[in-house]
Image (spheres, coloured by chain):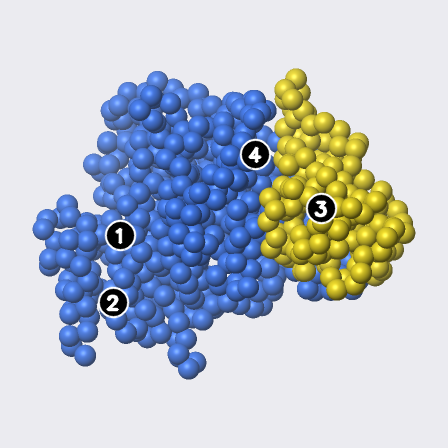
Amino acid sequence: MYRYDEFDAKFVSERTAQFRDQANRRLSGELTEDEFRPLRLMNGLYLQLHAYMLRVAIPYGTLSGKQMRQLAMIADKYDKGYGHFTTRQNIQYNWIKLEETADILQALADVEMHAIQTSGNCIRNVTTDHWAGAAADELDDPRPIGELIRQWSSLHPEFSFLPRKFKIAITGAPHDRAAVKVHDIGLRLHKNAAGQIGWEVMVGGGQGRTPMIAQTVRDFLPQNELIAYLEAIMRVYNLYGRRDNKYKARIKILVHEIGAEKFKAEVEAEYAKHPAQQTQVEEAELARIAKYFAAPKFEKMSRFAPHFEEHRRANPDFAAWARNNLAAHAKEGYTIVNISLKPEGGIPGDATGEQMRVMAELAERYSHDELRVSHAQNIVLPHVKLEDAYVVWQELKKHDLAAANYGLAGDIIACPGMDYCSLATARSIPVSMAISRKFGDLAKQEDYGPLKINISGCINACGHHHVGHIGILGLDKKGEEYFQITLGGSSSENASIGTILGPGFSAEEVPDAIETILNTYVKLRESKNEDFLTAYRRVGPKPFKEALYAAA
Amino acid sequence: MPLLKNNQFVADDYTFVADEDALPASGKVLVTFARLKRDWDEIAKLPAMVGVKVANTDKTDELTPYLSKIALVQLTFPAFTDGRSYSIGRELRLDGYRGELRADGNVLPDQLQLMRQVGFDSFLVSDRFPLEVWQKAAHSMSLAYQRGLFRQVQETEVWSTRHHGFQAWEEQPHAG
């Protein structure tokens, strides 16, 4: 894992002092709220429906046990004993006082963390594959580049007042678990014909009210040119991105309005004007960072794990969890443990301080002191010996963390919705809880197979409904909440935007509607191996529409 | 409006001449970019260098042919959240412009250091804040990760410092 050196530490501590001063000036009235807002936003502090919300950055989703314990401490001391892991691999605290925020930032700085640029019209926390450095299919660990981008984008003087927020996602594996095609910039590591490693650079993806899939502007960019090339993209966006309408200000609109070819030409012209003449420093810095991400010292294990097999045979609950929640590790005898933060009837992504400490402890004892936050709002223990999986499971079970629904119908992504958020038009959490209860039966979930149900409480799409296999969007019609259902979205390498099926449903009707859709799928699938998304892509929306609306 | 330069309030020795007013025979004048282009033949013959007001929608490439006559470029921030002039200023510096680069408009202490880092060296500011506030704001952060920025002597450029031996920043005399 990356460790701060004296410069990183000083940077974060000065930034904290700067924020303390800004908060004091706001409290004394020297700063107006209009002037303070962009400053607090650049430090992750939002004013929500009931209180301030602080969003803490978890760069590229990676945490140590110590850091997770500090997040637990903050939940207990400054919030109501819990925190909410988000689709941006961050954590949010929903009950924060302005007067205490600088102290929280200091507590974060103590464990090499911060809330810098988790909000505001700037380059946001960079996200990546939550299995980075562990996944069997990975080409290279994307986190060193993630850290390089974190540093480069931190208080970038030229790009701190962009037309709109800006999100960068990176994947180092062919199977995209980082949703790079629905980010402002998506970076995919791959090899060219000469066997060199470089980046495919995609621009202009996004969700929100105008969902779009990113366009490739460079097929292959050498590693060392990345920062200079990003500067060119950012400059074109900063100069030409729309500022007249905040709903049309994201880079995807610019790419769409001028066309991908013209956009690409603008970027290449800008890049040609100031090409990367000197990249030795960036290369040396990347090499320095990469050392921190060297693989942990894995033991040589046999592929067959007798203890693990034994418990799997003896204990059906453990077997189900192992079947759904473990993923292939690059190293023999090791596994990736996915902890589902989606207990039946629970709030997706919420964890109590106590649960965070349990996960921290497990990471320290069994996972080389590493945890990951996934954009699907789950926690990952990336490097666990198969032989330890059973004890890990037992401990998780004691703390309501052993839901065996990873990647299934119960593993729902949901935004905070109108229970917290001032932008929301509907309450996404209760709908998510109702669906989770409806499909509580694991056998049923396993029969439905791999499934992504994503719920957003408004058109801004924080719950990623556009790219859910089943997407649910909460809207408001004359004071009545209703929910629109979309099918066929995907955020992976074959990304697509879901199609709206038809008229919406009331909150109470949604779980039954989802069940109708899933039963329709079961009836029409070619075999159990044809998952929901594949089947939908084969048959299209028609049979689902008929099943849902025929009766009415 | 006070003019902040080298951490002091100083007198502004430029006179803005509106597009329809006659150009004075002497003294430093500030004109719009449209005027500069329109009356270039006349302006080129003026004895002194001139200043030009550039909108944040203007293209810096178009300014290039005139730069040898220009000693001041004044860029505007219509709102402090409108960051276009950061890129225009940086481009001008990257293109080698070494004259005065002035920020105008909604210039506030909390953005002062960012403006300096991309190459601004004078600032038309509101009189709401005393000089000490500006002086403090000018160096509220002592280090930056990005390379190629304008910095003051006591400021550290992190990546270049970590990897000295490679081409580091040159000291930037203009970062007033």
State how far apart marks 3 and 2 are (Cα).
49 Å
Q: Amino acid at mark 3?
A: Met
Question: Pointer 2: what residue?
Answer: A501
Q: Chain of mark 1?
A: A
- Splitting the image into 4 quarters, where does residue A306 fall? top left
Question: Pointer 3: what residue?
Answer: B115
Pointer 2 with pointer 4, Cβ within 8 A = no
The location of residue A24, given as percent across then percent down, is 77, 56
Of A326 and A520, nearer the camera is A520
Q: Can marks 4 and 3 be said to lie on one chain?
A: no
The location of residue B75, given as percent across then percent down, is 70, 52
Question: Pointer 1: what residue?
Answer: A451
Of marks 1 and 4, the one in the foreground: 4
Q: Earlier in the sequence, mark 1 or mark 4?
A: 4
Q: Say few, some or many: other residues with alpha carbon within 10 Å of mark 2 (under 14 / 14 to 19 / 20 or more).
A: some
User: Which disc number belongs to residue A274?
Assistant: 4
The location of residue A31, given as percent across then percent down, is 76, 61
Which quadrant of the figure contains the C terminus of chain A?
bottom left
State how far apart marks 2 and 4 are (Cα).
48 Å
Colour yellow, chain = B
Q: Is residue A373 left or right of residue A30?
A: left
- Residue positioned 32% across, 60% down in the render: A471
- Splitting the image into 4 quarters, where does residue A177 fall? top left
State how far apart marks 1 and 2 are (Cα).
18 Å
